[in-house]
Structures are given as C-alpha cells and as structure tokens.
Amino acid sequence: MKLKQDFFEQLTGYYQQVMPTPLPAPHWLLWSDEAAKLVGIDQPNDHWLQVFSGNQRLPQAQYYAQVYSGHQFGGYSPRLGDGRSIILGEAVGAQGSWDVALKGAGPTPFSRHGDGRAVTRSAVREFLISEALAALNIPTTRALAVIGSDLPVWRETLEKGAITVRLARSHIRFGHFEYFYYGDEHRSEKVQRLADFVIQQHFPQFSCDNAGYKAWFAEVVASTARLIAKWQVFGFAHGVMNTDNMSILGDSFDFGPFSFLDTYQEDFICNHSDPEGRYAFSQQPGIGLWNLQCLAQALTPIISSDDLLAALRQYQPTLVQHYLQLMGARLGFAVPAEQTEAEQQQDLQLIGEFTQLLEQQKLDYTNTLRQFAHVSPDGNSAALRDEFVDVVKFDGWWQQYQQRVSKVSELDAWQQARRLANPKYILRNYQAQQATEQALAGDLSGLQTLHQLLKNPFDEQPALAHYADRPPQWGEGLIMSCSS
C-alpha cells in the first residue's frame, strides 16, 4: 500500500497529529478483498493486522485526526472532530486514492472525554453496511476490515473493543467548512483554502476562482440529491444526518444507527435517540436540503448568495428526476431524461399509490418489489398480486400501472432487467445482530456468510434464500442507539 499525504501536507491547521492506542491481542473478524484491491493490498496477514490495530507504526503514515464542527439534530456544535478515528494518509490505487482511517483506535484531541474506542457490534455493522451499499451501487465509504479484541469497552453494557479500517475517497464533511466559517477569524482564507483543496483533489474539471466555486457547489448539491434519491429508492434510512456526517463528495458516510426498511413505513425512525423523527425515512430529502443550506452559509465568503441560491434551487428537481429514473427501473417503466412537470407528477402519484398500498397492507418493501421480476406487465400479475390481502385495491393500481408501462416484446429480458434493479437481499438489522452475537461467541461463519451474501444482492443464491425472508416479529424494524 502506497500512501501519499496531500491533506496532511497542504492543510496544516486542519488536523492534529495523534498516535493510535494499541488494541491488545487483535484478530481478524472481517476482511473485504474488493476494498483491499482499491488500496493495493493483496491479503490479510499479520503485518497488516499489527498496523491496523495500532500495534505497529507504518513508516509512511502520518496519523492525524481532523477537526470540524456541525449541526447535530438541528443545533450547532462548534467543535467536533475525529473523536475515535485516526487517518494514516491517502492510499494510491488503480482507481484513485482513498483515505485510510482506523475507526476505534483510541482517544484523540477531539474525543470530548470519550475513550475513542468502537465496540464489535458497531464496527461489524459499519463494515456490513459499507459493503452492502457498494454492492447496490449507492455511493459510500468502504470498509477494508474489522479487527476484534477482548478489550473491555463500556457502552450501555460491557462490550468488546474493535477497529473498523475505513476507506473514504475523502473524509471532508460539510462540517469542515462550518468549523472555519464560524470559528476562525481568518474564515475567508481558511474556507477558500479548503475549497481549493477539495476542487484540486476531487473536481479537477473546475477552476479555483469565482466560476469554479459556483460550478463546484452546484455539483455538491447534485451529488447529494442523487445520493438521497438512491437511499429513498432502496429504502435506506441513515439515522444521523447531521452536517458533520455529510460527505462533500456525496458518499454515504459515518454509520451509527441505520436500517433498511423491512415493512414499508414512511415515518420509520431507526435511531432511538431521535424520538421526534427529525431523521425519519420520509424526512431525508428535506434534511439533505437543510444540510446543504448550512454548507451554503459557510461558503458565503467565496460564493455569492445569488449563485448559492441558484444551485440550491436545483436540489429538488435533481432528486426527483433521479428518484423517478431509479424507481421506474424497479417498477419496469422507462423515464425519459426530460419530463414535463405534469409527467413527473403522474409518475410520482403512481409510485406513491403503490407505496401507500405497501404501508397500508404492511408489506415487506424489498420482497414486494422483487416480485416485479416474476410478473408480466401485459397480463399475469399473480406473483405480485398474491402479496396483497386487499386485492381490489391492488387491481385498481395494476390497471393504472399497465397504462404506464410500454408493451413488452421480450418478457424474459424485461424480467431480467427487474432482477437487476430489485435486490433480493438487503442487510437486515436482526441478521447483523445474530451474526455478531455468534461471532462474539467465537463462530465467524455467520458474519462471513452474511458478507458474501450482501456482495451479490441481486443474485438468487438459492442456498441462502432464507436470508430474504421477512424478519421474525422480534426482529422487525429494529432501531439502534448512537453507540451502534
């Protein structure tokens, strides 16, 4: 693994150096070959185990924690930073560079009296969701590995400490810009310097001047809109959409409480620290815009208000268009790149009536959509119709749907396209919990099976078909805490 140190060398003052606290008696819990290839590592071995557990220093690594702030549940926190994550540098791979970070590697100057550790269940969950989202083609940070130990760590109960080796195209968040905008007397210079770095590293098509800053922010708005459209389409709830958890590149980032929908529920809350539902599933599109408005305020030293507002006005149409294209693919009707507002509203109404049926009849979101791979839009709907108790309401919707879908000439090809758009498998919280408990008891087979399953979510995988079953009653819609 070849490391470079662009952030460390070019942005002095935007971080503090800190060494990891060694994890005693480390052992591998999970490893991603696909993520390892991104950074030029062939296989897990004792060398990387000692490096990533903090027991051996990597000579070319600089080891630092970044500083940032952010709006958390609507309130501004002026100084946050990497409280339990230590970055080694940027690994250069065949597909670009990736920050390599040790999450759970001990306290940093930004730990705010915390121990800087992660526990096994949270480390495992971050690994699994990172790799699951990647397999669904949803932009995300990646997880290279999870390293376990017997180190006692206290959360709600006594648990075992672990480290997730996280890869990110960048760890820069909306909150980085907020920190220097609100908290530094040289805010214009600091915000501009950070923007220049982001543009030069990740948006080389834009210039570092007024025109370039304007175009860059417009792209940040668009990438955020596209990301949240994908979350909504696949039924993913992030749980903690604070501005310090929003990637400047539009990647899914910083996983605490999260969940895919089991039974479809618009107002589903996956975080028991969010009783008012600020980050409920249905609120994600609006929160995405709210967070972008916070970022826009922090960028006022380098971008005019008119240009910021013009970019923000494109958020909703971008999100809606991307959502419609993806949901159209799941349901089997084509959405043109350019639609009239009336056509968009008709499609949104058709989709909305379908999801209302799902919610009213308490149907599983993923399993029901998968049934579109077994229907004929010209006639037979038995595979899908059988999911519904109130078939009269379904039949009424199906008639509208048939009017929207073009006549299908090659049914096999049409159904195959639905299989490639509708995953059979998602990461269900109860399955992650069961596999983690099994691993803590010394059996890693459940984690390994779940990992392999989620790498190919669109494939049938007959031997593992039971992983697509609806959760048992105790596992339905599990919610998590921020220590998850």
Image (cartoon, helix red, strand yellow):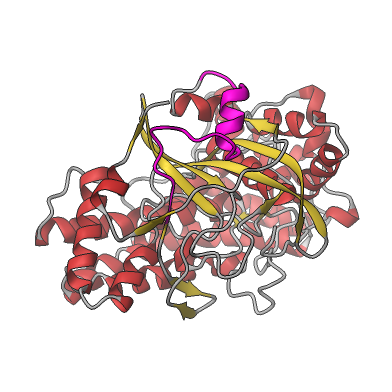
Query: Residue 194 lies in what quarter of the image?
Result: bottom left
Q: Is residue 52 magenta?
A: yes
Magenta span main SS: loop
Which residue sits at x=79%, y=28%? Answer: 464
| Quadrant of the snapshot with the C terminus | bottom right
Q: Is residue 456 above or below residue 177?
A: above
Q: Is residue 88 above or below residue 188?
A: above
Query: Residue 362 lies in what quarter of the image?
Result: bottom right
Which residue sits at x=80%, y=53%? Answer: 159
Along the viewing direction, whichever of 375 and 51 lies nearer the viewer: 51
Which residue sits at x=80%, y=31%? Answer: 444
Residue 256 left/right relative to 286: right
Residue 58 left/right relative to 113: left
Please state the extent of the stretch shown in magenta in the rendering.
Answer: 42-65
Q: Position of residue 413 (x, y in %)?
A: 55, 24
Q: Position of residue 91 (x, y in %)?
A: 39, 33
* Residue 321 seen in the current view: no
Q: Position of residue 286 (x, y in %)?
A: 47, 70
Along the viewing direction, whichever of 260 and 99 lies nearer the viewer: 99
Q: Is residue 166 magenta?
A: no
Along the viewing direction, whichever of 62 and 450 lies nearer the viewer: 62
- What is the total number of numbered labels drawn onto the structure image? 0
Q: Is residue 184 above or below residue 477?
A: below
Which residue sits at x=33%, y=60%? Answer: 14
Q: Position of residue 460 (x, y in %)?
A: 71, 26
Q: Is residue 77 above or below residue 331?
A: below
* Residue 309 seen in the current view: yes
Along the viewing direction, whichever of 18 and 438 lies nearer the viewer: 18
Query: Residue 209 lies in what quarter of the image?
Result: bottom left
| Quadrant of the snapshot with the N terminus | top left
